[in-house]
Each structure stands twice: as C-alpha cells, then as structure tokens.
Amino acid sequence: MENTVAFVEHPWEPIYDKNSKVLILGTIPSPKSREVGFYYGHPQNIFWKTVAEVLGKQEPDRNMESMKKFLLENRVAMWDVLKSCEIKGASDSHIKNAIPNDFSDILRTANIQKIFTTGKTATKLFNQYCAKDVGMEAEYLPSTSPANRGMQAKQAFMDEWKKIKI
C-alpha cells in the first residue's frame, strides 16, 4: 500500500567497476522500482531518458542487464544512499530510521571523481551521514520522479544534469 509505512531494505548491489568516474545515488528504490526489479523503474520516471540525452547515447532497454551495461559503458556507478529505512510509499519526505549504505568498496575499487544525488532528500541524507567517511559531499541533481514535472520542463533541469558528463 502506498499510504502505509513500510520497512524497506535495499534490494540490489551497487553497479560499478574500476572505470566508473561518476556515482549517482538516489535515496532508496521506490515501490514500483522494487516491483519491476531495476533502478528508476517507474514508467513515468525520466532518469534513463535524461542520462541518455546528457551523454548523447541511446536510452537503454528497461531491464537491469541493459541498464547495467549502459551505466558501465558510460563510466557511471549507481546505488542509493540508504541501506534501509521506514518509508511511506515512495515519499522521501516520509523517511524515518534511515541507515546509510557503506560506500567504501565502491570508492576503493572505482575511480569516482564526483558523487551526485537525485533529489533534495538524497543529497541531505548523504551529506549528513556519509560525506565525512567518504571524503566528499554529494552534488544535488533535480529529481527525475514524476512528482517533479514542473522543474523538469525547465532548461535549468538539463543544465544541472549535464554536470554528470565528466
């Protein structure tokens, strides 16, 4: 149910390899993403379209293997800030009892030069719980969620997302 508070544990491993230069973090997978089995899986979420456009690439097919290949080919690592939390539906504003992920393996293996977070809550949580241990703060990117349609229509949205192109 979208209106009940649920305990959510992150269902997937991070996506990265030694060539990854940019790490993009959401907060925690939404109910729809968990249902379909991949990051940013809600059909109205424009994450994959946005990243493909910024990188000048074709959008990957909507399955974990295609998306994983797309990310690695473009030197992008992906995961989420939280390992677990209590959350009401997909609303980041209703997160409670947040436990952050451990990013040490990613940072030890990959050549991460910048960390970006999708949405204000992800940025706040990363910078509050993880930045000190990681040794860098995350840079905010506007959310690609359907709840952020107003911002997505503006040029500033794409200008912000262009920062991932290193």
Image: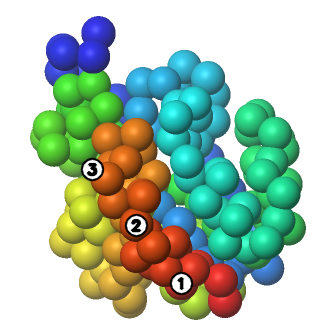
* Pointer 3 local density, CA inside 10 Å: few below 14, some 14–19, many at least 20: some
Measure the alpha-carbon separation of dots 3 and 2. Answer: 33 Å
At label 3, the amino acid type is Ile
Residue 5's disc is none
Q: How many marks?
A: 3
Q: Secondary structure at mark 2?
A: loop
Q: Nearer the viewer, residue 78 or 62?
A: 62
Residue 130, can we see it?
no
At label 2, the amino acid type is Lys
Image position, residue 1 (x, y; %): 29, 9
Q: Quadrant of residue 56?
A: bottom right
Residue ID for mark 2: 154
Q: Secondary structure at mark 3?
A: strand
Query: In the rendered image of this protein, does residue 32 appear above or below residue 19?
Result: above
* Pointer 2 local density, CA inside 10 Å: few below 14, some 14–19, many at least 20: few
Residue ID for mark 1: 163
At label 1, the amino acid type is Lys
Residue ID for mark 3: 99
Q: Nearer the viewer, residue 11 or 140?
A: 140
**Tag 2 or tag 1, which sits nearer the N-term?**
2
Q: Nearer the viewer, residue 161 or 107?
A: 161
Viewer-side label of 1, 2: 2
In the image: residue 118, left or right of residue 74: left
* Pointer 1 local density, CA inside 10 Å: few below 14, some 14–19, many at least 20: some
**Tag 2 or tag 3, which sits nearer the N-term?**
3
Q: Quadrant of residue 87?
A: top left
